[in-house]
Image (tube, rainbow, N blue to C red):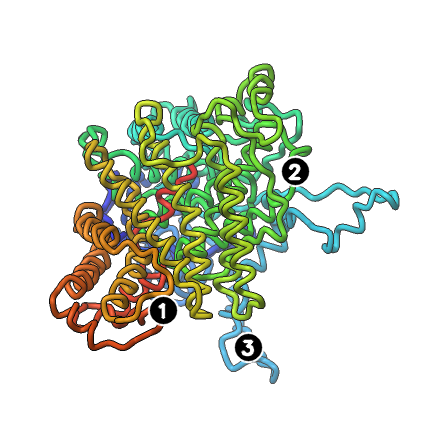
Amino acid sequence: MEYESPRVKGAGRPPGPDPDLSHPTPSSEDRAPTTTYKIDSEHLQLLPRLSFDCHTLIIRGALTMATPRRNGQLSSCEPCRTSKLRCDHESPVCGRCERRSLHCTYHPAPLTQSSTGIRPQKRRRVVCESDPPSNISRLQNENDVWTRKKASVSAPGFLGQTSYYDSFTDTKNGLLVGVPHLTGHDNFPVDQKRINLGARVLALLENLPFYRDVVTARFKIWKGWSLGWPVTNMVLTVVEKMWSSLETEGMDTNQRAFFLSKRLFEMHTRPLEVHPSMTWEGFQSAAAWRWELIGLLFTLTGLATDWVPHGDRIFMRQDTMDPKSLAITATAVGDICLQFCDSSGIVNDIVGWLLLHQVTLLAIVYGESDFRPWRKLGELSTTIFALGLHQNSSAKAPFFLSEMRKRTMVSAYSMDKVLATFLGRPPLISWRYCDIQMPLDLSVEEIFADPVVRNAAIARLDEKSGWNLESSLMKGTWPRIALITSVLREKVLELSLSCQVENLSQRVEELSHESRQLRQGLPKFLHWKPDIDRVIVSRVEYDLLFEVHMEFLYNDFLLYRTLGKRTQTQPEATIGIAREILKALVTMISEKTRSRQPIKGIGLSVCLPGLPSAGVLCAELLRRSRSTVTSSFLEFPRSEIIQNLTLFATYLDTIIEIHDCNYRVAQQGQKAIRHVLDQVLSVEGLSSAAEDTGTSDKFIDDANLLDGLDFDDQDLFLGWLDGNMQHMSDSWLAWVNFT
């Protein structure tokens, strides 16, 4: 979605140009690494500007200022003074020194410095023949000096059977060397610009009560299953304690943000060590004072804006951001905090949670077709593997963290399949190389409960299948279904995206049979029916059941659509599935319309797989109207299909509103469907059938659907009919919300 990025109201600052945060402050060997932060200008505008008193900064040792001389003019820095060049007196680094990467210092009394009277000779640079014809100093890694002197390389994380480390952990040969933990750099130095950037982020915590209210309102609608309320409340509570700590008493917002930023950089590099006997309280203590926790708070807040109605009273308060601005700000803060963690080599469970929710938030704000969610998904997949979440690690962590890791892995795996299907790209996480554990069908509250309560909840699960016997969808049911359907979706993608597939027809039939078996094996309370009692099932649960139903149908649709396109066979199977999809959509929307319920999340199913299914039925309807030969398969209820296509075209106006990014595509789909119906129902369409001598039962070319129809972007809509999702801008991941 395309959102504007209005400026957030923050503390004032003295007039002058904004600091260029893409160029870090040059420093000496004992100073911080000069990591470059690639942050969009619109993101910087969202962060508040800090205003500090110069005397306060000098007392705190933050920077050195140019002092006035006897004539009232400011003194020049040492490099400009010795070079006899004009200095702009900027602090802590003047413009000339910043451009030339010089060590900029302001001496309070330059004429009192000891002098030998001999001007040092300039060194002549010797150029070797092997040197490239470019400025070699510019090609050197700016982190080389401090990396060797100040920091150690972080551990690689999980190492598998083929790794260089595996032979040293072979217990059969008596070798057992401890696996290195994922830690940050030791004594990691921090430059002033990084602290200033962190302070601008922390200044947003002035609205902490507002963030808590937004997140709390979201959990009243849907509790989620990836983190749930216990972890979310922990994040809010820990940050609230940090913001109101006694050390910051009496400070204003800017001073507090600067002080806490410096403290966070001093403490966040410590490793987050976990062990089987670790308690939930111990984990909370270890999670405090970390940048990844700050980023997670804002990301969770940004995701909540997609659930809480934008007309809610929470967003009507004075001096608060509107939902769109809040979501965009959350993406900026999340990216900055992840860069802080990346520059210091930090990888832990909280970083994994932050990446997981950042991918979803980026998809909500910018759409799945944007490159940013896919790129962030790549970071998530590598983090998942580095943490070893793709293997069974339950013996190395406490119960609550072990179960949360299972859900994190399932969330990342499911999200990978969502984006891979959406973009038509190979998945980044393959089930062939993973031992993904099925999460227990417990609520998040039961996972974090006392052992007595937790064990009692586990005893109530079905011994054979593992499903809860309470017919509850609000526990661990959704992650279990997500894992089942995602493994099946990856097999479908393997057939659909593979260039060469042998025995395609046989493999499609086998996968279709496996899909039916999995669907029949689900408990009865997980089967969607149009006449479900809405008194027993809540709105969110009803929508979840419908999504499960559509997931299995769409897998079959993709399978037989692939088979039909490659072999030009079995059109009846694709048409039958398209009929079922369209009928279910019309029934669902009609039921919601009659009961006056919000149609949130249905826009996804209307466009995907609604439009491709409608396109298949339109093509077959048009082919039959132009053919004088009876089809080889007779089950094609013409009146039912025409009625459902008419209703579906009408609902496109209701579901996809004018401000939605998919509005143009939905309008083109509606125009195409009505164009086909006009041809089929008109006298001219019937008369043309008598002149047609076609005898093929194959699909009519999709381009024929658009004959005589004026389109703004014909290829765009044909992509929809083909099931190509790369043009979709609405957030698919918004519904598969794992928070």
Q: Residue furthest bottom?
A: 129
Q: Position of residue 629 (x, y in %)?
A: 30, 70
Q: Identify which amino acid the numbered label 3 is placed on.
A: Arg
Q: Is residue 166 above or below residue 438?
A: below
Q: Secondary structure at mark 3?
A: loop
Q: Identify which amino acid the numbered label 1 is placed on.
A: Asp
Q: Is residue 343 visible?
A: no
On-image quarter of the C terminus = top left
Sequence-wise, the earlier of marks 1 and 2 is 2
Front disc: 3 or 2: 2
* Residue denoted by label 3: 124
Sequence-wise, the earlier of marks 3 and 1 is 3
Q: Is residue 457 left or right of residue 177?
A: left
User: Could you give the CA–CA distance between mark 1 and mark 2, rounded to whole angstroms?
Assistant: 54 Å
Q: Position of residue 568 (x, y in %)?
A: 42, 70
* Residue denoted by label 2: 393
* Residue denoted by label 1: 697
Q: Position of residue 606 (x, y in %)?
A: 28, 49
Q: Residue at x 70, y 50 (%)?
A: 160
